[in-house]
Image (tube, helix red, strand yellow):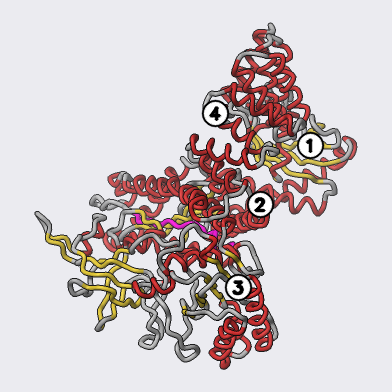
Amino acid sequence: MPDKIDDFLLNEFASGELKIIFNYLNKVAEGLKGVIKFSAPDGEIIVAEAQTRGVFYPEAIGSGFIYSLNGEDLSGLKTPEENHRVLKSASDRDIFYIIYHIENAFYSLVFTGGARRAHKLAESAGACLRLCLDFAGTQSAADVEPMTQLFSRGCFQQKLHELIGAYESELELIRKNDAPLEHDSQASNIALVMFDIDNFKNFNDTYGHHAGDIVIKKTAAAARGAAAKHGTSAFLARYGGEEFTVLTKGLSREGVLALAESIRCAVESIDMAEASRSAGTAVKMSRITVSLGAAFHDAAGGFIAERGDGFIGECADALIKKADLALYGSKQLGKNRTTEYDTLASLCVGVIERKGDFIMIDAGKGHQINHGDEFEVYDSVYNGSSEVVSAKTSKKIGTHPRLLKGTIRVSKKFDRFDSTLMEKTAVCDIINETLPIGAGDICKLSGGVEKEIYSGDLFLPRGLYRADYYSPSAAADDDAISRRRGFMLMNIKNAIEKIMNANPAKLSSAIEDIREQAFKNGQVPKEVLHLSSDKILFCFENDLKPETIENFKIAACSKLKSMNGAGEGIRISFFNSSSLKETPPSARQIIRLLRIADFIGALYNDNGAAEFNCQTYRKYGLYNYYCARYEKALELFLQCERLFKQPPDFRLYQNAGSLAYKLGKTGLAIKYFALAETLDGSSAVPKSNLGLLYSGAGAFEKAASYYRQCLELDPDLAEFHNNLAYNLLRLNKDPKEALEHAKKAVELSSASQLSNFADTLAAAYMQLKNYKKAAETYSLSLRASGSRTASAETYLGLAEALLKSGENRAARLVQKALKYLPTPSKSHEPV
């Protein structure tokens, strides 16, 4: 390992080091429960929760250990006379810690069993620990790139796979359990920023390769300083050459872009006079700048993709590819800037060439372009009041010429082209043209489309399957389709893939046979429209009957089974316009609703026919919430009321209220929680939510009333007792009642709740002037919280209680220990 690594990298190295040690020692030492690395700079420990900091593997073993150090003097372990020390756990009598001091750090091995066994193990375990540390040091050195002292590409790849694997496991649980909105989707957010040095070749060619190395080192140091402000949420690595990566978890979209911008500014601010002296150049080198691209891991891909053995690797490769495309977009827009992948289709698309009535643009599947996407085309030269702005210049300064020349759409005319949509280019039809469109013109994506429900359509070569693909546009088409009452979408993508593998020569006849099953089940469709090779829309004169849907799917699956031996691969989505308050006025909107039903059916692994109804739309709102699109999710929840004839249910009101509260829309949250309470007065959930809202708004009397109602429904829930006690204390009346509820909350609390609830109980004792009991309870809170979550407020409360109970010396020691405390404060809000 290098001699000096920045603080924000230490936890990454330490946790990896401890994992290596644990995995090895676990094979040779029976009863090993964990490994801890911690600091104790003062030797004599007064308040362990404040004076020590540790890294734990596994994480769960930490809090009990830290409290066990109180009153210990570990300075003897730094001398040859004391080789190790055995400590008994303060919270579990079956747990013992063997502590060693090795190379200026303390390590503790956590074992189960008696003290005698721990002493017997100490010598051999210590020898094994030293061997493991040597190996871990070698491993860590391989994880660091020597020139920049940043993580290496291999280490970055490993970290990326770990994060995506954990993220996908979490989302799988959420999908299966239809998790409530208390889930913090932003905490799981994975983003990747890639950046490289602009015009780096010029530094090598002009000033020499030594100067190029200095430029790389200076860039790495500047980026490290900017990333360090985001703590361990930013994982910075050298990807190769002059290219770098920053991997983040738990940062919002705005936070990731702010991080990228801070790196850009830090690099741009490098002292070039000092850099030139380091490089030994006779003249001052030109300014260093970087171009950055940001991309986010796509939750939709994780939900609906077929998960093979290489699924995590495919997700990682896709994220790198998106960030790299965004980086290229920054180069295209003029360099020294940050571009987000999702904005590429709006910022970086232009006309490459025109052939007759077809336009080729420089964007494709890699930029999230789909068949049917439309673009407004602007003139490449705009004669403004004072200057002429070319297409290239307009992109650099972030503006678009305003001379609209026409509209184009990604084509589906496969009789003219082998493919109209490729990775980085697409062929478009001209929809309308007021001025001739030509090479160099700028394209701007029209409207905001919901990519997750429109992406992935399959278009087969004309030699395999020939169809006329429908694009909703003409008013006559819209009018004819919107008059229908029943609509069904058949998705046969998986079936096509199975047939392609089994017998591609029969593909065309197989699709026709499956499609024709719709005409053999009583209700005959009036229109059959191919949206793509794998998605077919059926429009019926009257409402679809359940038996029609069921019979169609049975017949289609039976036909498929006779072709390839497997009767799976067909997904059906449908709705009847009679279920809606108003029939969608256009074919485009009808298709959108069916696509949402199809997407949600795949999302929730629903093997039956997916009906577009209130629950489907609610789940689509939940999906947008999981993707941290909170405003969009709330909009979808609210649309359910206006869209469906069937009244919304309890879950919808709960979801809408929870999300409105998360967005700070208190009035809206109260409205929907009150509606949820009206629908189900026997549930404590909406009442507790209303209590939380009123408490946060300072209406403690109302909040207390709701928590009393909650306790009538569920008298053994610790959270309700604690929150009632909190609100009574804020009202500054009935302290004895508050004390009783706070005691009950502590009695019923789980390990994770104990620290917060003990704080409430201590506050009740303080209000009753029982300072000795308050001090004991604050101490209990500190023991329960451990080193990672102990708050300054709890220490201050303990100091005040000790002072008022006459324990002046102890109070001063606690106040002194506060200077060691870097942890954030706890919230005083109820939970």
Calculate the distance from the C-alpha at mark 4 to the C-alpha at mark 2: 48 Å
What percent of the width, then of the height, locates residue 89? 80, 32
- Disc 4 vs disc 2: Cβ atoms closer than 8 Å? no
Q: Nearer the viewer, mark 1 or mark 4?
A: 4
**From this viewpoint, which residue is outermost toward the front?**
542
Lower sequence index among marks 1 and 3: 1
Task: Find disc 4 in the rendering and name its residue.
Answer: 696
Is there any visible trace of residue 150 in the rendered image? no
Task: Find disc 2 in the rendering and name its residue.
Answer: 136
Task: Find disc 3 in the rendering and name its residue.
Answer: 571
Residue type, numbered disc 4 = Gly
Q: Secondary structure at mark 4?
A: helix
Q: Nearer the viewer, mark 2 or mark 1?
A: 1
Calculate the distance from the C-alpha at mark 3 to the C-alpha at mark 4: 46 Å
Picture disc at residue 450: none
User: Taking 26 as reference, is 779 above or below it?
Assistant: above
- Range covered by the magenta-colored residues: 290-303
